[in-house]
Amino acid sequence: MVLRRLWHKAVNTMLTFPEDSTSPQRYVTLKRNIILIMSLVCIVPLALMAGINYSLYRVNLESEIHRPIQVMAEDTRHAFELFIEERLSTVRFIAGAYTYEELRDDHTLQRVLRTMRSEFVGFVDLGLINKEGSLVSYAGPYDLLGKDYSQQPSFQEVSVRGVYISDVFMGYRKFPHVVIVVQRMAEDGRTWFVRATIDTGRYEALIASMSLHPESDAFLVNPQGIFQTNSRFYGKILEQCPFPVPPGIHGTHTIRTRTPEGREVLVAFAPVRSDYTLVIVKPLSVLLRNFYTLKVEMLVIFAVGVVAILLAVVGVADVLVQRIRNADERRATAIQELQHTQKLSSIGRLAAGVAHEINNPLAIINEKAGLMKDLVDLAEPFDRQDRFLTLTENILQSVERCKAITHRLLGFARRIEVQFEELDINAVLQDTLGFLEREATYRQIDMQLHLDPALPPLVSDKGQLQQVFLNLLTNAFAAVENGGCIRMRTQFDPRKKMVLASIEDNGCGMNSEVQKHIFDPFFSTKKGSGTGLGLSITYGIVKKLGGSIQVRSEEGRGSTFTISLPLRGEAMEPQNTDTPQNKETP
Amino acid sequence: MNSKLKILLVDDEQEFVVTLAERLELRGYQVHIAEDGETALACFEPQAFDLVVLDLMMPGIGGLEVLPRLKEIQPDIPVILFTGHGSTREGMEGMRLGAFDYLMKPLHIEELIRKIREAVPSRTS
């Protein structure tokens, strides 16, 4: 239950794409989850396929490797049986073809042995044993004449079965030998035995003819598990074989087992007559060498595939998350812009309402106070006349200040109505300049005009543009010292189809902190004298006309305001005026 | 002794218009008040006034409607406009319709006097 809950939680965490959080952690989580899911989806099937392939192939291969070793064991077994049968027949033939007396004769026996040795490889000696078990005649390298075999198990066995093949034993010259004894019963009832010794070097030759892999092994063992031939790895002749021979097997039998050193091997047992068992030992590593190569190749391909998938997944996730992040940022900026514009527009409406209501009473106060002043001026001198005059003068000054504010507020709201007409922006600029010419002359400000005479006609609102230029020029006038310089420039940007007008001054400039807020309503650096609405209004108007405004300023060096206006301005709703490109004009 | 300049002052804000009229009279002008466009048009006839001071924002017939009709009656009548809401555009529009100039409320009496003198230079006292 707890495990299940934990699992659910893990899956949920992995599959949830956080929406609410705006922190960078969100994108890290998002990226991690995308990478996790995509990797899982890609790698799990790949791993499954590789695993299934691997096990299927392994099962197939195991059955495949049994067959060759069985065939080989079978073939070699036949070779051994043939070899032994051949020798046995030869001895039988001699026993049958010659009489006891003939074989009793040393010369005959020597001749027969010579003939046998020339015809069949492996015969070492030949002897005749009488029914009492005594070796009565012998041809060969050993001195066995007169030896009594009657008490030996071989003698007992041959008396019963008629044939005896001994285990391998080390002869007098330390060569491995096998003895074959054949019983002969003559028609007259006499019994004797022919005994021959065979050099088992032939066994080794038979095994060598299998041309085994250097790491494989093959040998003969007797039913007791004693080596009858030398083994490459597991012991010398007459030693105990480490592999237990399964008893009572018919036909070839293979098993998988381990060597005493712990090596995995495939062992084939093939009974040779009932006397020996042929054992072939092949290490699995040799048999499965191809399989191991394949396994390594598969692993490499799998690893390369996984790495490629991971790289692709990480790359895709990277791009994806970056796109999402950019989109989010753009959206956030757009929302911010929208909020700003809405703030401006609601402040504008509120301000206009207030200003309008206040402006009329203000005009009345102005006239009443003016009249009071007039009356005091005209009256006969009276007590504290100067004081009255100062007071009314103060009222008038305050009205003047209020008037400045209400006019700005009204101007702020006025961008709501726009009337488009075809106009020449140079003419509008020059007209506006007319309002300020007197001040420019008075303050000896150098007004430089760089107007492009070939500007295309512009469709926009003349009054609003005048207001814009007036605001910007008023600011420039406020920024420069007497004798300063204001440069006005108009030009056409054919690429963007925008008319650009810039007003540059060499005045006090602004630091970046001030630049951030200059378009905010009621933000002012002119302490006391400013309403903080001029640039806010300007910004609103330019936006309303479908244009944009940029500012470049350096503290102490001056400022440049550039407005860009479309050739065909279209009245835009405040909601639509926000585009991310205008980010620099908050 | 008809040397006094005759001014028709049109504005709907009674307190304002009465006080302003008194101030102008103190300065030697003869002022006739009309509190809306209809009254102004009713009392206006050729050569009756030397100058009209006209508020643009009035209930009923606004200043921008009154102005061309005054001009119809007496094309050379100088008209000074008041704008109540700080708009240069309406002022400009008025200028296009033949107004002499425009001022923004609240106004400086000195400025108004100066405009009046500019508008009617021959009759300046």
Image (tube, coloured by chain):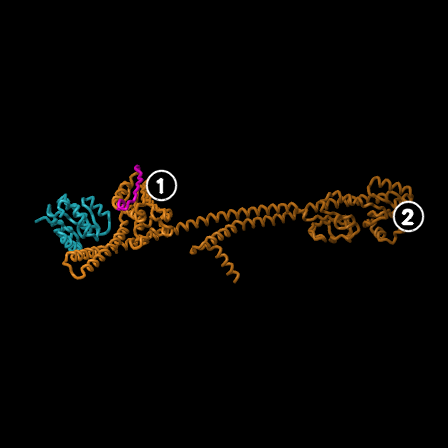
Chain colours: A orange, B cyan
Say which amino acid is labelled 2. Leu
Q: Is residue A142 left or right of residue A18?
A: right
Say which amino acid is labelled 1. Lys
* Chain under callout 1: A
Chain-order first, disc 1 or disc 2: 2
Q: Residue furthest top?
A: A454
The disc at residue A145 is 2
Q: Which residue is mark 1?
A: A496
Label 2 residue SS:
loop
Q: Is residue B34 left or right of residue A541?
A: left
Nearer to the camera, B22 or A192: B22
Label 1 residue SS:
loop
Range of magenta residues? A439-454
Nearer to the camera, A243 or A391: A391
Q: Do tag 1 and tag 2 residues touch (Cβ < 8 Å)?
A: no
Residue A417 in picture, x, y percent from top left:
26, 48
